[in-house]
Image (cartoon, rainbow, N blue to C red):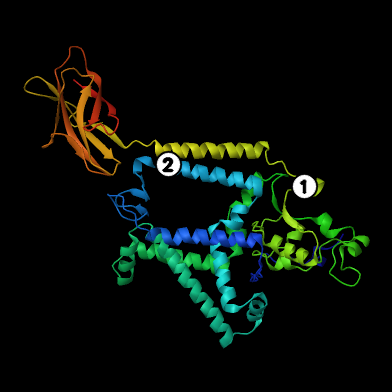
Amino acid sequence: MANNDDLSYNAEPLYAAREPIHPKAIHGRFRRFKNIVLLVAYGFFFLLPWIRWDRGVGPDQAVMFDIPSRRYYLFDLVIHPQDMFLLAGFLILAAWLLFFVTGLVGRAFCGYFCFQTLWTDLFMKVEALVQGDRNKRLRLEKQPWNVEKLTKKGLTVAIWTVIAFWTGFTFTSYWADAPQLFVDFFTGDAVKAAYITTGILTATTLIFAGFAREQVCIYMCPYARFQSVMFDKETLVVSYDAKRGEGEAGRAPLKQGLKTLEERHAQGVGDCIDCNLCVQVCPTGIDIRDGLQLECISCGLCIDACDEIMTKRGWPTGLIRYASELELETGEKPNLLKFRTIGYGLATFAATVLLLYGIFARAPADVSVQQVRQPLFTVMASGEIQNNYNVKINNKLQEELDFRLAVEGLPDAKVSVVGDFEGLSVPADSSRKFLVHVRARPESGVERKDLEFVLTEEDGRIEPLEHDATFVFR
């Protein structure tokens, strides 16, 4: 029996230093689509806080989260605290849409629309602009620290920091009047929360998009972990056609006797010339020829790279393409109208309809009635019983509303509003609370009775508002 002391093995290291990835620039349809998404996304994000919008009442900023007044302004749409169910509806819609897209085309959201992808893409463009193409960046990475390396690296980080700062400041601008915040921020008059929020987002954007990059997708993002539950054999993912690329004898570079498809096929060699361009353009540094991998964000840049090579050779494109596992195995095109995608699609459609209904069917005003408990009732000198109620009216319109108050269910009740009010007037886009006295004669054997407050708008611009309450006799 062997002694344990004689046993030896080479343990695999648990940790390894990150090797920087420097993707090669590529042109193609997926790269063009990514550029379009990049421009549109940045256009919306960076410009929206500066667009002015006259809505009569409230701030003149097109999009703004106004915390002090508890309002969310989206052009002419004003979301009040009572409408927070719309936020839940939007989050449900976003989740179902993500499931639907993932069931169809895998991690396409990650490759084209994720914030991490968009900002990393921009930071990489800055890096290429300052430091040069991939070969120059690799050479710069290996050379010792000197004036050239310090200058280029320093300038790159400086530009990244400016972009990160403006990203953080722009986000903060959604929560305050952007032009005024700009002045207050740089004169030291802004609130502490503005500096803290901008500072945190500046640091996280710089670290995640400038230095962590693909590590955020691989190690931090949970989406890569649970996406597999939404995949099946008919989900379209970025795939390498191994049958065509490897052939019977494997892939081989171009050389004498293997320069044409006819020569390669005659020797059983696949169409892949092993140029590694698909690896060089990958932002996460993987080899798509190794199959579906957690690190793949489905950006399609390896498709552009492979198609470029195939086109130059005059060979058919599509060696790397969006394809399902079933298609690669059998050659059959995937059935997109399967139970999973239909279910996700119907859920997404239903969530969209309900969200739109919630937006357009919102009540222009609402009322709440709360009975004053101390005292619960008062016996007046006339023998009448008085109950007091706090009536709060929320006016969500951009115009003043005037109401008349009546009580139903309590015959001969007397209603009066504390204060000098001939009517219940509520300014535009605001709330007002009124103390209301209701008096009634006691009824034999009755301890309490249900009643209903009815508020009718003077000009009939909205439907009457109704709210149930209880009148206590003893």
Tell me the element at label 2. helix
Mark 1 or mark 2, earlier in chain: 2
**Rendered residue at 36%/50% (across/down):** 73
Query: Relative to 460, does residue 384 appear above or below in the rendering?
Result: above
Q: Residue furthest front?
A: 314
Q: Residue 23: which disc?
A: none
Which residue is farthest bottom?
147
Quarter of the N terminus within the rendering: bottom right
Quarter of the figure that contains the C terminus: top left
Assess whether mark 2 and mark 1 are in contact (beta carbons under 8 angstroms): no
Q: Quadrant of residue 332?
A: top right
Q: Is residue 268 left or right of residue 376?
A: right
Q: Residue furthest top?
A: 444
The residue wearing badge 2 is: 86
Q: Residue at x 58, y 87 (%)?
A: 146
Q: Is residue 203 above or below residue 339?
A: below
Location of residue 359 with respect to 122 vertically, above or below: above
Q: Nearer the viewer, mark 1 or mark 2?
A: 1
Residue drawn at (30%, 30%), measured in percent from left and top?
A: 463
Q: Relative to 318, does residue 155 appear above or below in the rendering?
A: below
In the picture of the structure, the residue carrying the numbered disc 1 is 327
Say which quarter of the image contains residue 9: bottom right
From where the camera sits, is residue 8 visible? no
**Would residue 162 be seen by someone viewing this image from the given angle?**
yes
Residue 242 appears at what percent x and percent y? 81, 56
**Image coordinates for residue 464, horizontal then vertical, percent:** 28, 29
The local secondary structure at tag 1 comes to helix
**Residue sitting nearer the eye, 161 or 60:** 60
